[in-house]
Image (cartoon, rainbow, N blue to C red):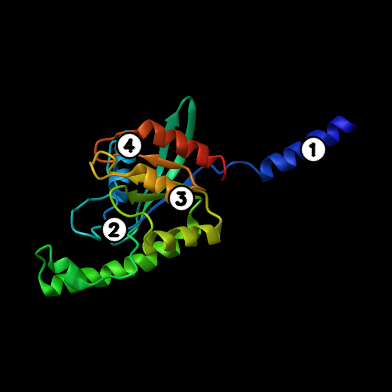
Amino acid sequence: MIKIVKNFFKRIFGNLFKRKEQLAIGFYGPPNAGKTSLANRICKDWTGEEIGTVSKIPHETRNVQFKEKVDIEFKGKKLTFKLVDTPGIATRIDYEDFMKFGMGKKDAQKRAKEATQGVIESIKWLEDMDLVVVVLDATQNPYSQVNITIIGNLVARKIPVLVVANKVDLRKADMKKVEAAFPEYPVVGISARYGKNMEEFYESLFDLAKKV
C-alpha cells in the first residue's frame, strides 16, 4: 500500500514539475553588442541558417525576430530552444546619431522611431522568456545605465541570466571588468564573430537551463 501511494505522488509531482519541451531564450543587451551575431552563430551551428542581419549602424535589429525549435546537443544532452533576438535596449535614441553614419535626416528619424518602438517591444517580450542571455560588448563600460536597466528588469521577473562578454577577440576587451560588474551571474567571454569559446557558452547555457 505504501509503495502504491509513493508511486502515485511520484507520478503526480513528476508531471507537475516536468521540464518544458521547449525553452524560450531571449538575447538582450545594448545596441551593437553582438546579440544578433550570437543568435546567428547558434542558428548556423544547429540549423545551418541565420536569424537576422547585422550592421555597424546601431539598431539594425528593430523588431523582435525568432527561430522556433532549435535543437542543441552538448555532452550527450539535448535541449530544444526558441531563440528570440531582441532590438538593442537604449535609454536615449537620437536620430542625429544615425546621421553620423551617412543616413539622411528623414531615414534617420524613421530609424529612431522604429528603434524606440523596438525597445518597448523588447521589454514586453520578457514576459515570455524562460531564460535570458545578456550580451555585452567586452570593450565597453559594463557599468552603464542601459545594462543596469536590463538587469533590473530581469531581477524583478526572477528570470535566470547568463551574461556574455562578446568581442573578446578585440584588444580593448576587458573580461575581468564585466565579471566584476555582475558577480552574482555566470559570465562567459566569447567572440560571436569568430566562434571563440562557444563550447564554454553552450556548457553555461545548459547549466542555466537547469534553473528553469
Label 4 residue SS: loop
Find residue 47 and name its label: 4
Q: Please state the horizontal and vertical placement of residue 65, each as a whole percent of the image.
A: 33, 54
Q: CA distance from mark 4 to mark 2?
A: 25 Å
Residues under numbered marks 4 and 1 in contact, where contact means CB atoms less than 8 Å apart: no
Counting residues from the start of the chain, the first of labels 2 and 3 encountered is 2
Residue ID for mark 3: 182
Residue ID for mark 1: 8
Q: Please state the horizontal and vertical placement of residue 54, each as a whole percent of the image.
A: 22, 51
Q: Please state the horizontal and vertical placement of residue 166, each as a whole percent of the image.
A: 31, 44
Up the image or down, 103 lies above or below 65; here it is: below
Label 1 residue SS: helix
How crowded pointer 4 is (Cα within 10 Å; few <14, some 14-19, many 20+) is rated as: some
Find residue 31 and name its label: 2
Q: Please state the horizontal and vertical placement of residue 171, each as a whole percent of the image.
A: 23, 41
Q: Which numbered disc, 4 or 3, marks the residue closer to the eye? A: 3
Residue at the spot x=57%, y=43% of the render? 211
Find residue 130 and name its label: none
Residue at the spot x=18%, y=58% of the render? 57
